[in-house]
């Protein structure tokens, strides 16, 4: 018996696997032949799995098998007819094998080299254990059974340093029964030690149809980051024509990288995007810039610098710098995270947090590209702290805040924009909690203090003012419950009457300016709040009782499924404070004795159905002021229906009044094809504001969606376009999407990941 070196394992360790053709040659087992447990692990679109049939021999020796075995006078061993060399970690089969042990083997006819999880087939081969000669296979087909990567090559060589050279080969991760895509190259070099490969004259073929060509391509062989071109994105729009983006990734260092993305839009111009990232021991830092040369507007630029630092578990800080140096212009093509804004933020903060106590200092300024746009107040700086102490009976919280507001562009002709100054806020909330299994009672007191130092630009004057206010409240709730039968399961239902009282006395706030006050949206939960307004510049006056009743249904696992809520505020006096204008104790801003009837219904806990509904009904006016319904249905597997309706009137800003419906659906046509539709309609303007229709295709290695979309943009102008997205598994995801809108097409695309 001759002794052989284990020369095959070295080849396998550095081999990057590429495609084969016949499923039965590659240990492929179709879905229907797999055990039920393995079928359940497959994605919806996958049709089978590789089951490794190679078994390691029990012997540590090398065994030779053939119809005829002999050694000639030169020491060459010949194996003719069903030749096989079996070693503990690999095996080599062919019609004939000849060679010198520990040096080389020549193989011819039906060559198969395999070890655990990997296999190579070829018409002939030369396997060398010498460092001077490469190992070579002709008409090679090879596979990695664990990753599903497979391929073929007219010739394959492995150099002494482990680099693999493929002549006229291709690569895919598709199942052997579905050749959806292949990456072809006339010359492919794989460097396992460096973790990347390169290819010349590359074609990406979809069902044997070439769709992309690259003269040269660099791609990774593992999960390590590698410098090279990423796959481009494409789009076609009725108004913009063809658009192309071709990103290039630069792995500068283990903790530095950059992505440079040239952009081209046929009817508008060209530009590029830049993203730089740094990851340190204490910080995460990103710089982004989008530049576009528009045919009509000229240069358009936005940029952003962001860093967050964590010094230890208590202290952290951050810096955000956004900028648009091109007045009132925004890049037509932009792949960065910077959106189009009226005001671009420039801020920095330092914070401390140890649980019960937290403190933060922030400086925030803005850049407003459009000179006609009103710039918001800036913080120079804001310092805020909060503390809470709570036991089972006692709960005390205090919030302190100091802000130096600066008006970057005061308008002496506008009463809402002719001032700035300093504001100090102190809020203290003290409550007691008495509770048991069937109810609770929580009385409390809310103390609010404000101090202002204001500069009025109208007459260039300064004045100080303050506001001190004490509110009292109590909240009480009683819980009744019973068991109910739902089929063969026992559910639990509760009935929870609620009563809340709030006494917030009127205080004249005519001299109090408004930096950040806003009216809260009236809803069932807001009805039980202890403050009428959001922000710190208005303290709402009221004396009111809020009556409510809630009922909840819990399933057999004590998970909440249904929640029904109905309530109303009973006002005991008129309200005289609003967010704008002078306050006058003789002129109420709201004299209704009751609020609208406030209702809420939610259902959760099922992947088949979810519901969120809110409604406000004014009994006095016999009018609905708010109707909001969001329904998500999944009547059968792979079918989705999203329904929503929003009707909201009597808002502080009439522009916020809405009467709009939306329906979107995704449903399968067959195992691989799906269709998605969306329609949004505005009942105030009596017109459709968004229409989407598209088709999607998916299998285990490719996903494609094509859609036509017609929508109303932020400038109240209609746009339309044809959008194409697709993913080649293990490569990249070329495609295009207009970032100014979202649709059911995005939901279909994101959901498709479960197929893998």
Image: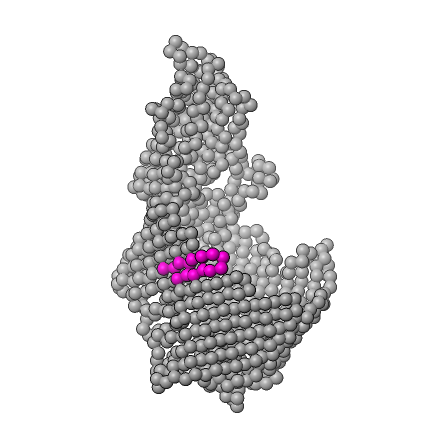
Q: Residue at (62%, 77%) from the top-left corner?
A: 473
Q: Residue at (67%, 55%) from the top-left corner?
A: 557
Residue 67 is situated, as x and y percent measured from the top left of the image, at 48, 14
Q: Which residues are magenta?
A: 305-319
* Closer to us: 160 or 616: 160
Residue 256 visible (yes or no): yes
Q: Residue at (47%, 53%) from the top-left corner?
A: 750
Q: Is residue 348 magenta?
A: no
Residue 164 is situated, as x and y percent measured from the top left of the image, at 36, 32
Name the dominant secondary structure of the magenta segment.
strand
In the displayed structure, would residue 501 be above or below residue 192? below
How many marks on residues?
0
Apparent side of residue 414 relative to residue 606 in the rendered image (left or right): left
Colouring: one colour
Residue 590 is situated, as x and y percent measured from the top left of the image, at 54, 84
Residue 258 is situated, as x and y percent measured from the top left of the image, at 34, 51
Q: Quadrant of residue 738?
A: bottom left
Q: Quadrant of residue 405?
A: bottom left
Residue 156 visible (yes or no): no
* Closer to us: 191 or 621: 191
In the displayed structure, would residue 336 be above or below residue 327? above
Q: Residue at (41%, 29%) from the top-left corner?
A: 11
In the displayed structure, would residue 617 be above or below residue 321? below
Q: Residue furthest bottom?
A: 586
């Amino acid at each position: 018996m001759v002794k052989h070196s284990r020369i095959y394992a070295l080849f396998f360790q550095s081999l990057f696997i590429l495609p084969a053709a016949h499923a039965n040659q590659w240990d492929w087992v179709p879905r229907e032949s797999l055990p039920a447990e393995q079928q359940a692990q497959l994605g919806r679109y996958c049709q089978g799995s590789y089951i490794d049939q190679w078994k390691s021999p029990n012997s540590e020796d090398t065994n030779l098998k053939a119809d005829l075995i002999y050694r000639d006078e030169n020491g060459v061993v010949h194996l003719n007819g069903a030749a096989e060399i079996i070693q503990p970690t690999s095996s080599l089969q062919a019609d004939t094998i000849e060679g010198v042990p520990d040096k080389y083997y020549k193989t011819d006819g039906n060559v198969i080299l395999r070890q655990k999880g990997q296999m190579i087939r070829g018409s002939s081969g030369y396997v060398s254990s010498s460092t001077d000669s490469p190992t070579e296979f002709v008409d090679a087909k090879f596979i990695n059974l664990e990753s599903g990567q497979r391929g073929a090559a007219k010739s394959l060589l492995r150099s002494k340093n482990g680099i693999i050279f493929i002549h006229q080969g291709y690569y895919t991760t598709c199942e052997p029964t579905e050749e959806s895509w292949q990456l072809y190259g006339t010359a492919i070099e794989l460097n396992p030690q460096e973790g990347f490969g390169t290819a010349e004259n590359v074609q990406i073929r979809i069902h044997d149809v070439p769709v992309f060509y690259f003269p040269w391509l660099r791609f990774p062989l593992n999960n390590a980051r590698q410098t090279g071109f990423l796959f481009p994105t494409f789009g076609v729009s009725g108004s913009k024509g063809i658009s192309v983006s071709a990103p290039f990734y630069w792995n500068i260092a283990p903790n530095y990288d950059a992505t440079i993305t040239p952009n081209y839009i046929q009817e508008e111009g060209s530009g590029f995007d830049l993203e730089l990232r740094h990851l340190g021991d204490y910080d995460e830092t990103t710089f982004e810039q989008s530049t576009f040369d528009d045919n009509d507007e000229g240069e358009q630029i936005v940029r952003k610098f962001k860093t967050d630092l964590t010094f230890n578990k208590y202290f952290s800080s951050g810096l955000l710098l956004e900028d648009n140096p091109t007045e009132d212009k925004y890049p037509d093509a932009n792949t960065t995270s910077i959106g189009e804004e009226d005001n671009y933020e420039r801020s920095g903060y330092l914070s401390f947090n140890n649980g019960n106590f937290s403190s933060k200092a922030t400086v925030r300024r803005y850049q407003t590209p459009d000179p006609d746009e009103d710039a918001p107040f800036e913080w120079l700086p804001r310092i805020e702290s909060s503390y809470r102490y709570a036991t089972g009976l006692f709960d005390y919280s205090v919030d302190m805040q100091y802000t130096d507001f600066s008006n970057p562009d005061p308008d002496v002709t506008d009463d809402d924009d002719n001032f700035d100054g300093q504001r100090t806020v102190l809020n203290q909330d003290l409550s007691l909690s008495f509770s048991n299994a069937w109810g609770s009672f929580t009385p409390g007191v809310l103390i609010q203090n404000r101090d202002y130092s204001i500069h009025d630009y109208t007459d260039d004057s300064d004045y100080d003012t303050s506001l001190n206010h004490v509110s009292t409240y109590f909240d009480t709730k009683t819980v009744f419950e019973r068991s109910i039968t739902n089929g063969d399961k026992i559910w639990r239902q509760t009935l929870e009457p609620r009563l809340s009282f709030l006494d917030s006395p009127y205080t004249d706030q005519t001299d109090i300016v408004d930096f950040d006050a806003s009216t809260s949206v009236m809803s069932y939960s807001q009805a039980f709040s202890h403050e009428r307004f959001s922000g710190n510049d208005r303290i709402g006056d009221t004396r009111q009782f809020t009556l409510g009743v809630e009922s909840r249904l819990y399933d057999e696992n004590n998970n909440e499924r249904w929640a029904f809520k109905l309530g109303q505020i009973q006002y005991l006096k008129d309200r005289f404070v609003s967010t704008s204008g002078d306050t006058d104790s003789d002129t109420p801003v709201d004299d209704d004795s009751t609020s609208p009837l406030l209702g809420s219904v939610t259902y959760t806990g099922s992947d088949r159905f979810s519901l969120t509904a809110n409604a406000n009904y004014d009994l006095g006016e016999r009018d609905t002021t708010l109707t909001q319904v969001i329904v998500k249905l999944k009547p059968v597997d792979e079918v989705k229906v999203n329904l929503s309706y929003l009707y909201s009137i009597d808002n502080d800003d009439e522009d916020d009044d809405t009467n709009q419906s939306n329906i979107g659906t995704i449903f399968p046509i067959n195992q691989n094809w799906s269709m998605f539709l969306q329609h949004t309609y505005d009942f105030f303007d009596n017109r459709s504001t968004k229409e989407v229709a598209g088709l999607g295709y998916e299998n285990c290695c490719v996903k494609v969606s094509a859609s036509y979309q017609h929508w109303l943009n932020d400038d109240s102008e209609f746009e339309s376009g044809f959008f194409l997205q697709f993913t080649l598994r293990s490569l990249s995801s070329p495609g295009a999407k207009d970032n100014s809108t979202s649709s059911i097409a995005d939901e279909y695309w994101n959901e498709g990941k479960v197929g893998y």
